[in-house]
Image (tube, rainbow, N blue to C red):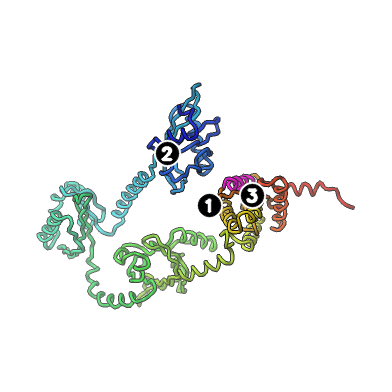
């Protein structure tokens, strides 16, 4: 029955299915057309009917995603068996992981004429699984890397987890912990100055898992002082599962703490009154101070970082690695991250550089970072003092000025002057490394008719949307500008002529299928494209653009809405074949 339905009747049948569904027509072994997707699929994916109805897969999703879909359609059509697969699709609602099931639909001859597809969104399930795996890895890493002794105990006394630091602090073997909480007590109480008070405090905490223990100190017979931290593990429904314990050796800290309290109070008052981010780190880059401005701008509380995290948590890893690699190449040797950030300061040189700080919530703050080395009277290295000034406003002004100088205001593409500058650099690089390089000159067909028929505002809309559609067809390494009027230019870096033809054809098709709305009126246009490439290391950009312009003229002479090329090899062959004039 499904093979005979079409039009509104097919849509009515599919819309009666509650599961996101679609029907694919099997034209031949390599051509599959999506006839219709039901309302449930439209709601789940954000794809409007016109984006799907009677479209090829490549018109709906990316070429790579469409090819994966077609492979499974071929399998379903060839075997006549259902096919289920998981794939990632780029949809209007974002990147989604979907479970797609394809079921063959046979005609009266028994051949697979159509394919009925259903779709289940598994994105959140996968994200949940990834989150759980990450949390488990994070917990394991925190335990093993923590300077604190860590112990996790269930409400029934079973010891669920511990780290090596806890064993070391109490001189214990693992078999003691495996025996449970109550058998662990004798080994611990025997080492304490006041075992009864410790026992009552720990046991009492299990009767109220809402009670947090925050840094209570107790003394050992060997003179050490430990700080105790604990929090109840409470799940859904306020159900208590146990407790996590943190044990910190503060013997040395307590000796110096009393002496530092007064000086720290004065220091903090000074630091917190400053408008810059002011922080200090020890010789291992672990935070020692973090002022109020740093808390406000970066979202971290000082207690989250001091003594626990290094200053690298504030840096963008990609930015650090990019600069480290560049510095290594400049010096001809491998430069470490520590040398990159602090090498000049350790040599006694001033260090004022611009970096990007990352806030706790992921916000990015451009800063001007001034570093100073901290040392004592014997010149023993103690760490660094950093003063970071927020230069967001300055960067925004610089960015706005750069945009005004380099960007076309209507299309948001680069302007001709900046394109020419960048293209010249790319041409020099291509000549130096003997790389291929192509140029596409693009013109909107009959653009004057758009202005004459719908007005200049409609023409501006067409220019903007065509520009965005063309730009989406390019790689990040490519470069596009508004060349002038209704003309655009694209620089295809490291691209062979046959590849450039494919890119140009994708551009042409994208614009041909583009429907633009202007005040309720739908407008469609086509484009003509002229291509050329780099001929030799001596050739100028003007020469390449001139051949592209000739090719564009040929495309318009051929009826428009097409691609023509004037390749350097062909021009050279014509020149060599021309008779010599005497």
Residue most extreme to the right: 582
* Residue wearing tag 1: 520
Q: Nearer the viewer, residue 94 or 248?
A: 94
Majority secondary structure in the magenta region: helix
Counting the numbered discs, the total is: 3
**Residue 98: in magenta span:** no
> Which residue range is magenta in the image?
500-514
**Residue 503: in magenta span:** yes
Instruction: Indicate whether 444 appears above or below 371.
Output: above
User: Which residue is drawn at the image coordinates 64% and 63% (left, top)?
Assistant: 417
* Residue wearing tag 2: 86
Residue 527's disc is 3
Task: Check disc 3 and report its element: helix, strand or loop.
Answer: strand
Instruction: Indicate whether 486 appears above or below 57.
Output: below
Q: Nearer the viewer, residue 450 or 398?
A: 450
Q: Position of residue 428 (x, y in %)?
A: 66, 58
Mark in front: 2 vs 3: 3
Disc 2 and disc 3 in contact, CB within 8 angstroms: no
Q: Position of residue 251 (x, y in %)?
A: 22, 66
Residue most extreme to the top: 109
Mark in front: 1 vs 3: 1
Task: Check disc 2 and report its element: helix, strand or loop.
Answer: strand
- Name the image quarter holding residue 384: bottom left
CA separation, marks 1 and 3? 23 Å
In this picture, residue 114 sits left or right of residue 251: right
CA separation, marks 2 and 1? 39 Å
Q: Earlier in the sequence, mark 2 or mark 1?
A: 2
Q: Earlier in the sequence, mark 1 or mark 3?
A: 1
Mark in front: 2 vs 1: 1
Q: Earlier in the sequence, mark 2 or mark 3?
A: 2
Q: Position of residue 287 (x, y in %)?
A: 34, 66
Residue most extreme to the left: 196
């Amino acid at each position: 029955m499904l093979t005979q339905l079409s039009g509104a009747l097919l849509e009515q049948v599919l819309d009666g299915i509650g599961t996101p569904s679609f029907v694919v027509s099997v034209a031949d072994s390599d051509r599959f057309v999506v006839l219709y997707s039901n309302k449930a699929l439209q709601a789940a994916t954000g794809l409007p009917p016109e984006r799907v109805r009677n479209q090829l897969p490549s018109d709906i999703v990316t070429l790579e995603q469409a090819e994966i879909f077609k492979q499974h359609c071929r399998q379903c059509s060839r075997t006549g068996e259902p096919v289920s697969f998981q794939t990632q699709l780029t949809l209007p609602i974002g990147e989604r992981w979907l479970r797609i099931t394809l079921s063959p639909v046979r005609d009266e001859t028994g051949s697979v004429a159509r394919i009925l597809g259903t779709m289940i969104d598994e994105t959140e399930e996968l994200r949940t699984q990834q989150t759980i795996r990450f949390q488990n890895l994070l917990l394991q890493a925190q335990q093993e890397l923590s300077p604190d002794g860590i112990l996790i105990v269930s409400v029934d006394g079973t010891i669920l987890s511990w780290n090596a630091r806890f064993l070391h602090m109490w001189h214990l073997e693992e078999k003691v912990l495996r025996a449970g909480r109550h058998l662990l007590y004798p080994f611990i109480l025997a080492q304490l100055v006041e075992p009864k008070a410790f026992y009552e405090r720990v046991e009492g905490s299990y009767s109220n898992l809402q009670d947090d223990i925050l840094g209570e100190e107790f003394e050992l017979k060997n003179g050490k002082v430990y700080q105790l931290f604990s929090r109840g593990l409470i799940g859904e429904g306020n159900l208590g599962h146990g407790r996590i314990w943190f044990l910190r050796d503060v013997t040395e800290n307590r000796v110096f703490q009393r002496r530092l309290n007064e000086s720290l109070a004065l220091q903090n008052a000074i630091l917190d009154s400053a408008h810059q981010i002011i922080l200090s780190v020890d010789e291992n880059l672990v935070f020692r101070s973090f002022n109020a401005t740093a808390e406000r701008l970066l979202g971290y509380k000082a207690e989250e970082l001091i003594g626990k995290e290094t200053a690298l948590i504030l840096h963008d890893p990609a930015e650090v690695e990019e600069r480290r690699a560049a510095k290594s190449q400049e010096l001809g040797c491998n430069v470490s991250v520590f040398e990159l950030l602090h090498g000049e300061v350790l040599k006694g040189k001033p260090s004022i550089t611009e970096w990007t700080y990352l806030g706790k919530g992921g916000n990015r703050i451009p800063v001007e970072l001034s570093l100073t080395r901290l040392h004592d009277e014997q010149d023993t290295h103690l760490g660094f003092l950093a003063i970071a000034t927020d230069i967001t406003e300055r960067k925004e002004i610089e960015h706005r000025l750069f945009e005004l100088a380099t960007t076309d205001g209507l299309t948001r593409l680069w302007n001709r002057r900046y394109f020419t500058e960048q293209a010249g650099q790319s041409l020099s690089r291509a000549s130096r490394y003997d790389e291929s390089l192509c140029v596409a000159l693009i013109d909107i067909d009959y653009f004057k008719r758009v202005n004459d028929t719908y007005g200049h505002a409609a023409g501006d809309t067409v220019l903007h949307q065509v520009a965005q559609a063309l730009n989406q067809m390019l790689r990040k390494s490519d470069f596009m500008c508004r060349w002038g009027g209704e003309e655009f230019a694209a620089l295809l870096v490291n691209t062979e002529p046959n590849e450039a033809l494919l890119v140009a054809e994708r551009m042409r098709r994208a614009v041909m299928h583009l429907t633009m709305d202007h005040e309720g009126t739908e407008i469609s246009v086509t484009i003509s494209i002229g291509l050329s490439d780099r001929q030799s290391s001596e050739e100028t950009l003007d020469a390449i653009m001139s051949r592209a312009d000739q090719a564009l003229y040929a495309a318009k002479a051929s009826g428009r809405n097409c691609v023509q090329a004037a390749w350097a090899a062909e021009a050279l062959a014509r020149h060599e074949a021309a008779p010599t004039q005497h």
